[in-house]
Image (spheres, rainbow, N blue to C red):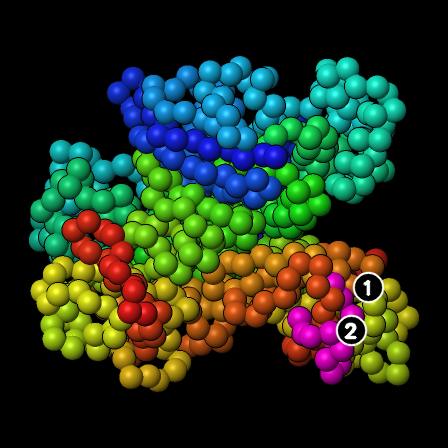
Amino acid sequence: MGTVAAHGLCKSFGKVQALDGVTLDVPDGSFFVVLGPSGAGKTTTLRAIAGLERLDAGSVRLDGRDATGDTPAARDLAMVFQSYALYPRHTAYENIASPLRARRCSSSEIAAAVERMSSLLHIERLLQRRPAQLSGGEMQRVALARALVRSPRAFLMDEPLTNLDLKLRVEMRTELTRIHRSLGGTFVYVTNDQVEALSMADRVAVLKEGKVQQVGTPAEVYERPANQWVAGFVGSPPISLLACHAEGDRLVGEEGWTLPRPRWTTAEDGRPLLLGLRAEDLSVERRGEASLPGELYGLEPLGDRTVVDVQVGTKILKVKARPTVTGTPGERLLVTVDLDRAHLFDAGTGLALSEAGR
Amino acid sequence: MAGIEVTALHKRYPDGTVAVEHVDLSIGDGELFVMLGPSGCGKTTTLRAVAGLERQTTGDIRIGDTLVNDLPPAERDIAMVFQFYALYPHLRTRDNLAFPLRAEGLPKQEVLERVDEAARLMRLGPLLDRRPHRLSGGEQQRVALARALVRRPRAFLMDEPLTNLDAELRADMRTEIKHLQGELGTTMVYVTHDQVEAMSLGHRIAILNRGRVEQIGTPLEVYDRPASLFCAAFIGSPPMNLIEVEVADGRLRGQGGLVLTPPPGLPGDRRLVAGVRPEALEVTEPGAERSVPARVVSAEWLGDEMIYVVDHGGRRDVRVRMPPTVRFAADAPVGLRHTGGPPPVYDVSTEELVA
């Protein structure tokens, strides 16, 4: 068993309200990612679950039992941090074995556990080396093996990949999902990187300013963002947002454009809205029923695709295109819009409009 | 405005450290030229030598027609931008933009014209009479960028100016820098370690490694045909799959039997590695035509695409880029096939492109 539940967590540091009623339910065995920008309260949430932070209000339940007053040790959770913090004078083997030695496991138990972890993380050949003889990526693997060698109730991970270079991060993403599948434990994983969240999580909680904005599967968070802010934070390039309102069977933009009103929306005429359009739901290469006139602002080749920046009024739309697309800044063009995949938000509250009709 | 010529640049510090081994660059007038490489590759030292903040050990630097080796920074008529500094909080956007121009002693009329032009180019019109606290973070950055670029030096030199911004703002600023540079037409040399930034900004990119230039080319040239294994591993995320290949009967075959389209002129007598982009591969149903057996290690959904990591030919890390709608589960047996044109092929011992 390894369920983790946080209910109504509140915590302030002086005048700063770090957590403002954070509620999370982490199912047993899930890879649960807490995603948000710096200052969102992610690390404080994780520390509160671990028992490293005194709460102003709220409760933490582990396996259904109230653990709010428990010491960190009594909670039986393992924490993995950004820094590796390996013992420099000990071999990789001794580093991995240390949590078990502290718990007075027998040497045969320790040997078996270290062997299992080193084969899982593909570091069998490194066991007799000291940290100074390991590369950054190898140290990260040893640190992970040490964190994972016990079988605690759940693993809490605070941006463990942040200090790795891009190439290693890509590799470790794959490794962590594979390890999670093999171990079957509960992972609570904190990150500010939406790519990590989308690619690894079973479920994602998106945090901003100490409040949970949305909890869902990666697909739900990406395809049905609960509000304008989540829509902007998740996805790269960022979603384009255009001010508009409905008028009969049209959407009328603040910048003068009109589009057919999406069939699925029931927004009343005149209510200020934001139309959210993702780069892959826009095209300058296809023709369609719905389009926006604009001017080419710039081209950003990325190799496997090019992002075309199109100026519509004073806004820039990001449009995904083939890598070889060409054009001259200032040239007029039409952006085809896939309205079935568009999003509408209330411009005042930022909340997504009901998509029940979709 | 002016082009920049760097010839046989070499920089050794008194302690014997060689920061730049040998760098030749020919940067065109009006070009947005990016120097890309990991830390310690020599890109910042090269930039600082162009700026005059660092004296090269040997080699020449020309800006326009002027040999500037012995000129102090102030006489080179270039602007070095380290980051886009905070705006003056008590000044309206209009005056924040005008400040560096007035400081240079420009006539009033010209200051007004430059501010108007910057406002038009950067879509700042509605913001001109606001003070910084009434601007969003992104708007503040746009004003700061416009302020840095309203001066008209012969060239701008930028050293990772976006490093401290969050991902969303960084993406916006890339767009704005590229647009504004294009409109102003001023030569710009931009240093970064971020390959996405380099690709999306540069007209051309120089990839530096250990004080030497490994490749110079347009973004698509360096992406499609990296000049060395170093460049192949550095550009693109996820990076190229480097697959050991054999040439037999004019065919190119990877470990595990994957058949690749062979480029012409392959040498047959050496150990070779092909660089296969994730989007040049395809995960199929098992047994599909031209496919070889593989197994899904993980499926990484990124919203607008899916990255499959598959186990094939004795390795567990072959990466394949697919549309987000195609779904194969982890551990599923699948097929793997090559769908792209001839891949670049490298000699394992020299690490250089051979075909």
The reply to whether dot 1 and dot 2 touch (C-beta < 8 Å) is yes
Q: Dot 1: what SS?
A: loop
Q: State which quarter of the image contains the C terminus of chain B.
A: bottom right
- List the residue tagged with mark 1: B313
Residue at 78% x, 63% y is: B312
Q: Amino acid at mark 1?
A: Gly
- Crowd around label 1: few <14 · some 14–19 · many ≥20 (10 Å): some
User: Tag 2, which chain?
Assistant: B
- Structural distance between the alpha carbons of marks 1 and 2: 9 Å
Residue at 80% x, 37% y is: A116
- Residue B280 on image: x %, y %: 64, 72
Q: Amino acid at mark 2?
A: Val
User: Tag 1, which chain?
Assistant: B
The quadrant holding residue A239 is bottom left
- List the residue tagged with mark 2: B292
Q: Dot 2: what SS?
A: strand
